[in-house]
């Protein structure tokens, strides 16, 4: 397992674990980051990630991306 922040651009990954406090987990789950779901890093801008998750493009801060394990 590696953090989403270290995943390769353009490769589809399966979410293995979502970390953080309960509020952070709920926030990420509401965005579509659920265990077993697919996520693809589209682009990285200044450490922040643009990802494809559940047919939506979402911007995630580097801090949040380190809480999502793939």
Image (spheres, rainbow, N blue to C red):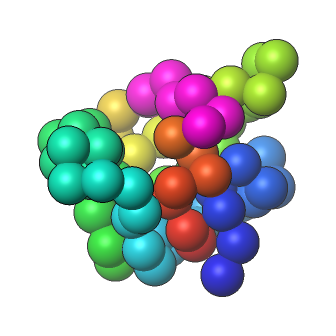
Image position, residue 44 (x, y; %): 77, 28
Image position, residue 42 (x, y; %): 66, 36
**Left or right: 17 in relation to 55:** right
Q: Identify whether 7 is placed above or below 70.
A: above
Residue drawn at 52 percent across, 55 percent down: 67
Instruction: Say if the magenta span includes residue 59.
Output: yes
| Residue 29 visible here | no
Residue stretch rendered in magenta on the structure = 57-63
Residue drawn at 32 percent across, 73 percent down: 35
Residue drawn at 30 percent across, 53 percent down: 21
| Residue 8 visible here | yes
**Left or right: 18 in relation to 21:** right
Q: Nearer the viewer, residue 34 or 41?
A: 34
Name the quadrant of the C terminus.
Answer: bottom right
Count all numbered tags in the image, as a single digit. Answer: 0
Q: Quadrant of residue 49?
A: top right
Instruction: Say if the magenta span includes residue 58.
Output: yes
Q: Can you name the residue that lies furthest to the front here?
A: 21
Image position, residue 2 (x, y; %): 70, 72
Q: Quadrant of residue 1?
A: bottom right
Image position, residue 48 (x, y; %): 68, 25
Q: Identify whether 23 is placed above or below 68.
A: above
Q: Can you name the residue that lies furthest to the top here?
A: 46
Q: Quadrant of residue 24?
A: top left
Residue drawn at 71 percent across, 49 percent down: 5
Q: Nearer the viewer, residue 43 or 30?
A: 30
Q: Nearer the viewer, residue 14 or 1?
A: 1
**Left or right: 38 in relation to 3:** left
Q: Identify whether 31 is placed above or below 12.
A: above
């Amino acid at each position: 397992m590696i953090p989403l922040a270290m995943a390769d651009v353009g490769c589809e990954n399966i979410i293995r674990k979502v970390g953080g406090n309960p509020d952070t987990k709920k926030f990420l789950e509401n965005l579509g980051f659920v265990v077993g779901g697919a996520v693809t890093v589209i682009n990285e801008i200044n450490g922040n990630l643009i990802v494809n998750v559940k047919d939506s493009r979402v911007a995630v801060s580097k801090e949040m991306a380190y809480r999502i394990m793939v």
